[in-house]
Image: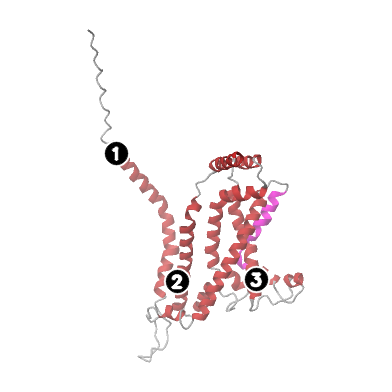
Amino acid sequence: MVTTQNPPAPPALSLPAGRPQRRARATSGSGRLAALLVSPTLLVLAVVVLYPTIVALKDSLFGTPGLNPKTGFVNETDPFVGLENYGAIFGAAGARFWNAFWNTTFLTGTTVALETIIGIAMALIMHRAFQGRALVRASILVPWAIPTAVSGLLWRWIFNSNGVANALTGQHILWTTEGFHAKLAVIIADVWKTAPFIGLLVLAGLQVIDKEVYEAARIDGAGALRQFWNITLPLVKPALLVAVLFRTLDALRMFDLPYILIGAQKTSVETLSMLAQDQAANVRFGPAAAYAVILFVYVFLIALAFVRLLGADVVGDDGPAPLRRRWLSRRRTEVAA
């Protein structure tokens, strides 16, 4: 009788004891390198953003030097008033503040909406292959390259009483005076200048879309409108949302264009930035800092809401290949049905 014996089991492999420590050491080294590389940017942000914000918050708690009713002497330093500046903004100066607040919101919403539509159209035109495309791209990007002060002066000449705008409309409109036409002038000038910015970012998103996606859609019989709605917009959405976010934050602090084009202390176009500048120009630095802090909080809340509501879409993990497979799968389901 032959008996068989099972071969002995191989000895268990044991990992070197020092490997977890080496991995932890490598991870900590990468973290230190990342912190070292990011530190210059954090330093610049601290100097440019954090320090002025803290100073503005501190200055908003002080009032304007004047006659001290208790001593009868003029204060040489700014008196500490606590939250009185904020109380005055929402109290005695509430009408002017809310007017500037709604002007800022209206101009931001209108200009960003128009710039998004026109910017997408510009990007689609610049993305097409045709003769003279380089010249068209350069001409579209020229308004964005012009400084805002120069652009404001240019449009001030256009909206002059004897300017090109009245010559084209055949009417005598005083664009730079009070009224809705002053808002319209600011909107036209701002859209003309900054729509190419959105177009440039959307163009960058269009250039990374694989042509095979459009070829698959054309084979399935999709028209140009359906390709734009189901392919172009989903793939270009991350770049578009970033462009809209940047433009929204920039438009909320609008100052130089309405200041140069229309003028200061114009109720129709006075924004929060213009209101803060007017207080500072009249040596009321405490109220000016309070307006600046409120504007900072407003911009911060808009940015936070934008990122929280649309943050997942900004990352955008859908690429051309998954979208192509999803498109083909949907088309096969429709044909089978």
- At a point 69% along the width and 53% down the height, the residue shown is 136
Kindly identify which residue carries mark 1: 20
Q: Residue at 39%, 73% (x, y): give it.
A: 58
Q: Residue at x 38, y 47 (%)?
A: 33
Q: Any magenta on residue 136?
A: yes
Q: Position of residue 27 (x, y in %)?
A: 34, 43
Q: Position of residue 7 (x, y in %)?
A: 26, 18
Q: Which residue is mark 2?
A: 293
Extreme top residue here?
1
Span shown in magenta: 132-153
Residue type indicated by callout 2: Val
Which label's residue is closer to the chain start, 1 or 3?
A: 1
Q: Amino acid at mark 3?
A: Leu
The reply to whether callout 3 and callout 2 are in contact (CB within 8 Å) is: no
Q: In this image, 66 relative to 208: left or right? A: left
Per the image, the residue denoted by label 3 is 184
Mark found first going from the N terminus, 1 or 2: 1
- Circles 1 and 3 in contact, beta carbons < 8 Å: no
